[in-house]
Image (cartoon, grey):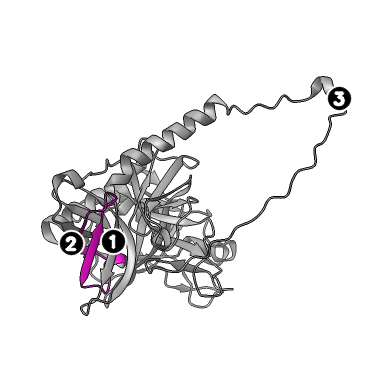
Amino acid sequence: MNKKLILAVVVLAGTLLSCQLSGAVPVQSVIPTQAVQLTNQPSADLVSQQDTLIAIYQRVNPGVVAIKTYDESGSPVGLGSGWVYDTDGNIVTNDHVVEGANQFEIDFTSGFKAYGELVGVDSQSDLAVIKVDAPVEELHPLSLGDNSQLKVGQVVMAIGNPFGFSSTMTTGIVSALGRALPSSYTNTTSGFYSAGDVIQTDAALNPGNSGGPLLNLNGEVVGVNQSIYTSTSTSTGEPVNSGIGFAISVNIVKRVVPGIIQNGEYEYPYLGVTTINDDIFSLPVVEALGLTQFSGAYVTSVVAGGPAETAGIQAGTEPTSIEGLFAGGDLIVAIDGQEVTGFDDMISYLYNKSPGDSVVLTVLRGAERVDVTITLGTRP
């Protein structure tokens, strides 16, 4: 069965299921003196955790909005989520939430509704900004966290409008950090790009959650919910949550959103290399390339005239036992002294750089370890 990365914005009909619990048969302990005494009082820790979640929801939810989109004829296109970025009325959401739409309705939790104007989009990070003219009392900007401080296992929460059920909160943990996902942005020069520094979470995300905030226990935005990875769907074609969701990191938001607001766009740094994706960098590939270690980003091609070629980064040219795979290329093992275990590490690091910045790539070239300084360009 094909696995799919679902960017969910369309309102889909949900089915409500009910169940009846059968009565439990009481069991008498055979060792009465060791019987556990049951109480109707929850533990202090559970109450504290519960109170924390309640407080976060009450504080943050007024800053989360539903976004309804329409085409030029006024027909509904889809539904997504968003959140208030500042008191100027800028709303952050996903690019795919606004794609194909001409009119944007912003629904606040108070019941206030207003049309918004699209400020700009960034297809590379899947972010968009809509500006709405709303009374100041409706604008509750959310606080921004720092995803570089996140740890796998940390508790996170999502608030959004799954299937049109407004102001829905779900909880989970950070499942992984620094993921790289395919970007919808392409060009004729370099083909497809990847979006980096993506957070993976098991907090339940469903169609309509796109564009809503992923929050830490301080109530700070640490990501923008974007997509789910699923291999199954319902009989009506609705994607089924698999416990694997993805969010754009807030540190990317901090860089991209101001650029969209000020200039309508954001410029990304450009290295000009193609490397082997982590999921296919297998032991047979390592053996065929004759590499001496099992981690790193192996360079398969460099863009002519690009920053990497100018600096002297080398791609493989020697045929191997695997068709289309060529040995002799550089294996990138570090960037600015930080270990690169694979493509995801490299792209996530670069996503936090700007055109004109210099980075030092440490590469294995045969048995030799070489440092190469590269001045990053601008993505074409």
In front: 266, or 339? Answer: 266
| Residue 119 sits inside the magenta stretch | yes
The reply to whether dot 1 and dot 3 touch (C-beta < 8 Å) is no
| Residue 294 sits inside the magenta stretch | no
For the residue carrying disc 2, how many other residues have a C-alpha within 10 Å: few (<14), some (14-19), or many (20+)? many
Q: Amino acid at mark 3?
A: Ile
Question: Upstream in the sequence, badge 1 or badge 3?
Answer: 3
**Marks 1 and 2, Cα distance to the nearest angstrom?**
9 Å
- Compared across the picture, whether 226 is left or right of 152 comes to left
The reply to whether dot 1 and dot 2 touch (C-beta < 8 Å) is yes
Residue at position x 21%, y 51% in the image: 357
**Marks 3 and 2, Cα distance to the nearest angstrom?**
68 Å
In front: 108, or 80? Answer: 108
Q: Quadrant of the N terminus?
A: bottom right
Q: Residue furthest bottom?
A: 73
Residue 332 visible in the picture: no
* Circle 3 SS class: loop
Magenta-colored span: 97-126
In front: 236, or 260? Answer: 236
Q: Which residue position is annotated with label 3? A: 31
Question: Upstream in the sequence, badge 3 or badge 2?
Answer: 3
Q: Which residue position is annotated with label 2? A: 116
User: Total of numbered circles in the picture?
Assistant: 3
Q: Position of residue 309 (x, y in %)?
A: 28, 65
For the residue carrying disc 1, how many other residues have a C-alpha within 10 Å: few (<14), some (14-19), or many (20+)? many
Q: Is residue 47 above or below residue 268?
A: above
Q: Which residue position is annotated with label 1? A: 67
